[in-house]
Each structure stands twice: as structure tokens, then as C-alpha cells.
Amino acid sequence: MKRITLAFIAVAMTACSSPPPRIPTEYDVVLTRPKPTTPEAQRQECSWIETSLERQKSLANYVTATSTYPAVALAYQDTTQRNMAVLNSRSQAISCQVAAGAQSFDQCFARCTQYTSRSKEQCFDACNR
């Protein structure tokens, strides 16, 4: 009886010690999407990538400036850096052109509303750095 109990405890501890499976984020899914088939679709996705990169930069800066716990700030910075790496990989994979210079708010807002399916409020937030 003792052996069965010990075996059960050992199996239970082994099962509990394995890390939970990692749930893919929306950024992980970006890499698995098929390449855009038309130039218009490519422009839309490149525009989305640009605004998403800016949003990630803004998020990292905001959390770093406002976090009261350094560990939280580091966790957010780590996550945003990973997301930005995924976005940059996707940008290279679909041959996006790097934007020359910083664009104005009006240019960013016009591109966001024209080339993405985001609402005006989402585009405003993405472009208002």
C-alpha cells in the first residue's frame, strides 16, 4: 500500500511540475498568416504593422514611466520587444518598405483609416504617440 501511495505522489508531482502549454498571442499568429496576394492587401498589412510597432513602443515607454514595480516594467518591456521582433519579421517576410522619416499625425491617421479595418478611435490612439 505504501508503494502505491508513493508512486501516486511521484506521478502527481511530475504531472504538476511541467509548465503549462504556451498560448499563442495575436503576434504569434501574424507569422503564420499567408502572404498578401495583392499590392493593396500588402499595403494594408504593412500599414497595420507600422502602427502596431508604434503602439508597442508607446506601450513600453508608458509602462516604464508609470510602473511602480520594476519587475512589471521589465515584463512589459520584454513582451513588447518580443512582439516588435515578430512584427519586424513579418514586415521583412512580406517585403514592406521602411517608412522614410517620421510621418505626421494626419498622414498616420489617413493611412490607418484607409488601409486598415480599425475604427477612427483606434487609429487616433495608434497615431497619437
Image (cartoon, rainbow, N blue to C red):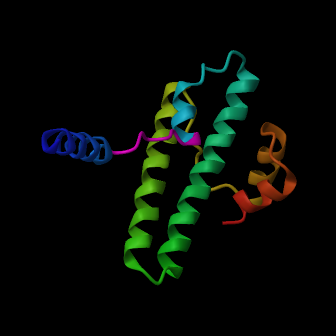
Decide which of 12, 129 is in the foreground and name it. 12
Decide which of 99, 14 is in the foreground and name it. 14
Residue that extends furthest to the right in the rendered view of this protein: 120
- Establish if 89 lies above or below 123: above
Identified at 47% across, 40% down, the residue is 86
Identified at 28% across, 44% down, the residue is 12
Counting labels gives 0
* Quarter of the rendering containing residue 78: bottom left
Q: Does the magenta stretch include residue 3?
A: no
Residue 21: percent from left, percent from top:
42, 39
* Quarter of the rendering containing residue 129: bottom right
Main secondary structure type of the part rendered in magenta: loop
Residue that extends furthest to the bottom in the rendered view of this protein: 68
Task: Assign the N terminus to one quadrant of the image.
Answer: top left
Residue 124 relative to residue 33: left or right: right
Identified at 42% across, 80% down, the residue is 69
Residue that extends furthest to the left in the rendered view of this protein: 3
- Establish if 16 lies above or below 4: below
Residue 47: percent from left, percent from top:
68, 40
Residue that extends furthest to the top in the rendered view of this protein: 37
* Quarter of the rendering containing residue 105: bottom right
Q: Is residue 23 magenta?
A: yes
Residue 109 relative to residue 10: left or right: right
Residue 22: percent from left, percent from top:
43, 41
Residue 127: percent from left, percent from top:
72, 59
- Establish if 108 lies above or below 10: below
Residue 18 relative to residue 118: left or right: left
Magenta stretch, residue numbers:
19-26
